[in-house]
Amino acid sequence: MIDWTVFTPLSALGGGALIGLAAVLLILGSGRILGMSGITTAMLSQLPRLSWQLVFVAGMAVATWGYALVPGFPTLTLEASPLHIIIAGVLVGFGTRLGSGCTSGHGVCGISRLSKRSLVATLTFMASGIATATLFHLLA
């Protein structure tokens, strides 16, 4: 069921449009795919040297903090413990290495390039996410 009191289709549409715009600008500007796992891996391998990947990841963090300052936007409430968040992050990192990419690389950029591999990866991500959410909902 959709909770209509917190349903925010306009901010979701805006966020999706910004992700798409960022993907288009990166591929047109540098010929690179906007996949956060690949960008983060490249950034970590080049530290402490300043790279475009470091600037990109820092921009993502600054944009997230800036989002909290915009009046009228919904607030984010985390109901998970820090331990659960760390475990989830490790599992996501493992999954992106296993899947040779993440949802942004495969789902946004790969599917838009008509990659069969990305379509299979995205369907697998989605099916796994739906199964996990359903399982947790049933156990809660």
Image (tube, helix red, strand yellow):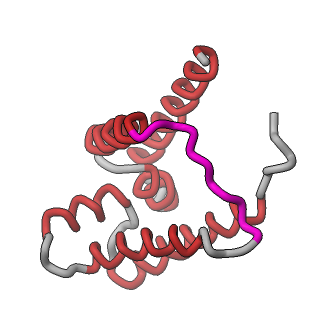
Above or below residue 116? Residue 23 is below
> Considering depth in this image, is 84 or 44 the residue closer to the camera?
84
Q: Which residue is the extreme one toward the right?
A: 4
Residue 128 point in image, percent of width and height: 49, 30
Residue for point 36% across, 43% down = 89
Above or below residue 29? Residue 24 is above
**Magenta: predominant secondary structure element?**
loop
Residue for point 45% across, 50% down = 103
Residue 40 point in image, percent of width and height: 28, 61
Q: Which residue is the extreme one toward the front?
A: 81
Picture quadrant of residue 13: bottom right
Relative to 3, is 76 on the left or the right? left
Residue for point 27% across, 74% down = 54
Residue 5 point in image, percent of width and height: 85, 49
Q: Is residue 88 magenta?
A: no
Q: Which residue is the extreme one toward the bottom?
A: 29
Residue for point 37% across, 60% down = 36
Residue 4 point in image, percent of width and height: 86, 46
Rendered-image quadrant of the C terminus: top right
Rendered-image quadrant of the N terminus: top right
Total marks drawn? 0
Q: Is residue 75 magenta?
A: yes
Picture quadrant of residue 87: top left
Q: Which residues are magenta?
A: 72-82
> Considering depth in this image, is 90 or 26 the residue closer to the camera?
90
Above or below residue 134? Residue 107 is below
